Image (tube, rainbow, N blue to C red):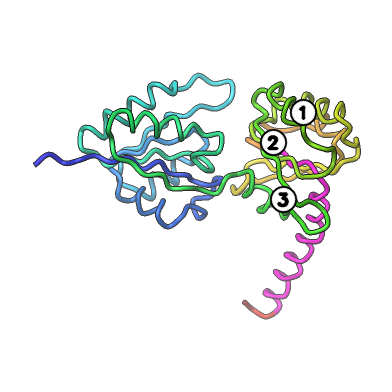
Amino acid sequence: MTRVGFVSIVGAGPGDPDLWTVRAARRIAEADIVYYDALIDGLALTQRTTARCFRVGKRAGEKGVCQDTVNQLLVRTARRGKQVVRLKGGDPFMFGRGAEEAISLVAAGVPFEVIPGVSSALAAPALAGIPVTHRGTASGVLIVSGHHPSVMESILDGVRPNRLTVIVLMGMHHRLEVVELLLARGWKATTLTAIIAAAGCEEQVVWTGPLEKLATIETSELPGVIVIGDVVGVRDMVTAVAVETEHMEIQHGR
């Protein structure tokens, strides 16, 4: 009897494998083949599965595997009867082209599932102690791609300045354009802003400051999430509580 293949489109969260969901970890452990994105820690992945693992994603400015090729790989591998995991950073359906892969599997008649992950749009701020909403400060969130800043124009035109939190993904190389777009639409130059680089990893770095300084600071090539809004100011209170709690646990020998 021919073994039927199956594809799991899995969200890996912001970077730390400890933040994978239980189901994601199970599928990865059970897989025959894993096709993973560039931001996934390949070493950590191979320590958690006996599957053959292939990097198919790309970083900004690098030549990588095109999306059509990835789609074909998923279909062909599943048709050979393999249990396939397509491991994507964050959530598969948040700027991750997971829907494109799902559509190609449907067209090919290949069974699949989608396992959500925590998007870095939510996870990165949380890991830095920044709530994306906070009572009395921000009751809404706008998540935008900064890969092509011009796409943001029409979105920002419908938003009242300084009334919600703006999260920019894939916008580190276009910070100046992001600042200019916001200032031109009435956002205050002093609006609190944060960059969380390498969220969920040991090398995580957090910068906070006014919007007008966002484009002037030195940054590394680490991937980063930009948070714009007054919620950034809550970080000082949250991190102070976290440090105090940690100190209390040490004092009590926990």
Residue sticking out furthest to the left: 1
Q: Which comes sooner in the sequence, label 2 or label 1?
A: 2
* Residue shown at 46% from the left, 55% from the top: 21
- The spot of residue 125 in percent (x, y) is 69, 49
- The spot of residue 229 in percent (x, y) is 80, 44
- The spot of residue 212 in percent (x, y) is 87, 33
Identify the image quadrant of the N terminus: top left
The dot on residue 168 is 2
C-alpha distance separating marks 3 and 2: 12 Å
Mark 1–mark 3 contact, CB under 8 Å? no
C-alpha distance separating marks 1 and 3: 18 Å
- The spot of residue 29 in percent (x, y) is 33, 51
Q: Which comes sooner in the sequence, label 1 or label 3?
A: 3
Direction from residue 146 to residue 34 in the image, left or right = left
| Residues in magenta, as a range | 225-251
Residue corresponding to mark 1: 178
Residue corresponding to mark 3: 132
